[in-house]
Structures are given as C-alpha cells and as structure tokens.
Amino acid sequence: MKKLFFTSLLIILTLCSCNKAKDESMQPSGITAEMAYEGVSNYCHQEYDWSIAEENPTIMYVAMGEETDSAYQVIFRSYTGALTYFYVNKESGSTRMVEYVPMFDIENEAGSISLQDYLGKNE
C-alpha cells in the first residue's frame, strides 16, 4: 500500500512540474508597455537637453500614446512644441521614430533605435 501511495505521489509531482514548465514556456515574451515607456524616456533624457524644463517641467515630457496589436506609441514633447513619436515593436523592441512639428504641419522619419539599448538605464 505504501508503495502505491509513493508511486502515485511521484506521478502527481512529475505531472505538476511538467505543467509548470509548460506554463512558463507559454508566457509572452517581448516588450511590455512599461518597458517601452522606460526605454524611450531613458533615450530622451540621454539625447535631449532637459535643463530648459527645470523651471517648468510640463514644457517637456514623455507620455504613452496609442497601442496597436504590434506596437506601442510613446510620445516625446520638446520645449519647442515639436513631437517625436516612437513606435516600439512589441516583439523585438525595434523602435521607429517620427518627428512632427505641429506649427508647420511637417512630419519626417527620424531614424530608429533598439529599445534594449536604453532599458535599465537611469536618466
């Protein structure tokens, strides 16, 4: 009877550990909205001069925009009023940048970055 009990217990534990491994492998990989915001914010704080916003922090900011099935949009507003839209691919982290100047209604492709290069870095 003890042998049957321990054999059953061993089988149950084995099945549970297999299901756990299967569940972990099914976790989504890629970029979260928080990661997209953090990486773009780190990039903007590294690449742009924020000293002008010290007295008026609302003049420059980073904010989340729209989300699609494949990308997050993160928006940087410069003190000049220009906007840079960052389109972060949810799977790869590759990020396309588009600059928009509302005053002149001008939009230009501004290049791309790898979001992973800016994750985990503080301003």
Image (cartoon, rainbow, N blue to C red):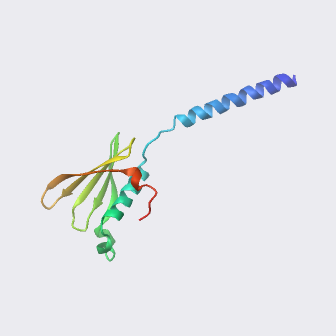
* Residue 21: % across, % down: 60, 34
Residue that protrudes farthest toward the bottom in the picture: 55
Q: Residue furthest left?
A: 104
Q: Is residue 63 above or below residue 13?
A: below
How many numbered circles does the render carry?
Answer: 0
Q: Specify the quadrant that holds the C terminus.
A: bottom left
Residue at figure coordinates x 22%, y 64% from the top left: 81
Q: Position of residue 28 (x, y in %)?
A: 47, 39
Q: In the image, residue 53 lies at what x, y percent?
A: 31, 72
The quadrant of the picture occupied by the N terminus is top right
Quadrant hosting residue 17? top right
Q: Is residue 4 left or right of residue 96?
A: right
In the foreground, 34 or 121: 121
Q: Which residue appears at 32% of the width and 74% of the height?
A: 51
Residue 77 appears left or right of 21: left
- Residue 51 against residue 62 in the figure, above or below: below
The residue drawn where x is 30% and y is 56% is 75
Residue at point 21%, 67% (across, down): 80
Hey, which residue is sitting farthest right in the picture? 1
In the image: residue 9, left or right of residue 44: right
